[in-house]
Image (spheres, rainbow, N blue to C red):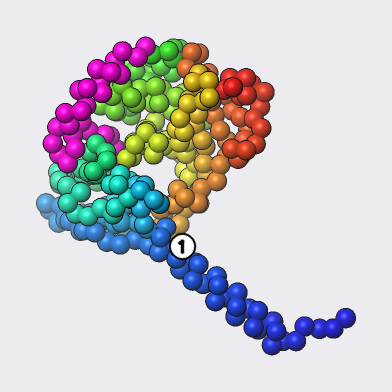
């Protein structure tokens, strides 16, 4: 058998590098590259908040991605990812308002296609977020109209999960988020799945609402190297269930992670009428789910 000449192998390797390196560079620039937007310092000078824009907005007119990093004098205290629905445009300092307090920093994130989001980062490392009833820090006149329409919709879900989500006094459930009618049913499903599948590393129950309901998520488990979380993906074809996708993604060396590289671990159905959570066993949308899942969602 004739051996392939070395120069042919070398040329082939060079051609592969010529093709792959630019593709890798483009992927890095559009998905991962972080650009510093602003830096602010606490009143006592002990803490610093750095705000980054991460990658390009989702194509064609999707959300822009950002990251908040709270630093102490010797180490990073906390970090938080966020999204801005801005008609496919990047965000800048005018879309963000930072306010420092004795024990925390708060950032109001605004966008042309979303209500404001309040992100709170405490000096003890805890973070939280909730949507407000304002747009660019001004009261949104459309909120009252939306609430009147949504109040006419009868809540179907019942059982312990609903009672826990709607009447719980636990500070881990943000009442300002749950009081918004369009979020109630989604949050109830999140809590039911969290109670069934989360582990001790997930901490307290919390739903992160980004630019829209479709960008909400809830962490089920987290380690130094990986994160598993669920994302609401809308209702089933028969409108009887909420569908939630469980993802797993690797963390980078700085503790951050990219949602775009996450892999599906399972898909759950939350049955509105009973509060039951059903696992499909699917790791791709094209897979066939369990018989119980298929009966509940078809």
Q: In this view, does 231 lie above or below 64?
A: above
- Judge whether residue 270 can be spotted in this image: no
The question of residue 145 being in magenta is answered with yes
Report the side of 297 relative to 33 (left or right).
right
- Residue at (19% x, 37% y) in the render: 135
Q: Where is residue 97 in the image (x, y as percent from the top left)?
A: 17, 47
Could you tell me which secondary element the residue under label 1 belongs to? helix
- Residue at (36% x, 57% y) in the render: 56
Q: Is residue 251 above or below residue 232?
A: below
- Residue at (40% x, 51% y) in the render: 59
Question: Where, by quadrant of the figure, is residue 205 drawn?
Answer: top left
Report the side of 32 relative to 131 (left or right).
right
Q: In which quarter of the image is the N terminus?
A: bottom right
Q: Position of residue 131 (x, y in %)?
A: 26, 34
Report the side of 254 relative to 146 (left or right).
right
**Circle 1 residue:** 27
- Residue at (11% x, 51% y) in the render: 43
The residue segment tinted magenta is 127-154
Q: Is residue 19 above or below residue 117?
A: below
Q: Position of residue 238 (x, y in %)?
A: 53, 20
Judging depth in this view, the residue of 274 and 250 nearest the camera is 274
């Amino acid at each position: 058998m004739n051996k392939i000449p070395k120069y042919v192998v070398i040329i082939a390797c060079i051609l592969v590098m010529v093709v792959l390196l630019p593709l890798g560079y483009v992927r890095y620039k559009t998905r991962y590259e972080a650009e510093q937007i602003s830096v602010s310092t606490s009143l006592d000078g002990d803490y610093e908040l750095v705000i980054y824009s991460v990658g390009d907005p989702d194509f064609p007119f999707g959300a822009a991605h950002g990251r908040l990093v709270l630093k102490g004098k010797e180490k990073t205290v906390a970090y938080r990812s966020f999204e801005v629905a801005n008609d496919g445009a990047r965000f800048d300092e005018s879309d963000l308002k930072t306010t420092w307090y004795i024990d925390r920093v708060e950032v109001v994130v605004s966008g042309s296609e979303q209500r404001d989001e309040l992100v709170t980062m405490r000096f003890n490392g805890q973070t939280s977020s909730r949507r407000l009833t304002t747009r660019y820090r001004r009261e949104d006149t459309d909120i009252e109209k939306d609430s009147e329409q949504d109040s006419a919709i009868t809540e179907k879900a019942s059982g312990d999960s609903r009672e826990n989500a709607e009447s719980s006094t636990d500070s881990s459930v943000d009442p300002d988020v749950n009081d918004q009618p369009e979020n109630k049913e989604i949050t109830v499903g999140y809590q039911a799945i969290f109670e069934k599948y989360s582990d001790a590393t997930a901490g307290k129950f919390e739903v992160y609402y980004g630019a829209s309901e479709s960008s909400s998520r809830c962490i089920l488990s987290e380690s130094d190297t990986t994160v598993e979380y669920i994302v609401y993906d809308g209702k089933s074809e028969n409108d009887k269930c909420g569908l939630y996708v469980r993802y797993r993604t690797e963390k980078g060396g700085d503790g951050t992670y990219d949602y775009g590289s996450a892999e599906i671990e399972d898909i759950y159905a939350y049955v509105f009428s009973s509060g039951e959570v059903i696992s499909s066993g699917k790791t791709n949308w094209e897979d066939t789910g369990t018989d119980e899942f298929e009966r509940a969602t078809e």
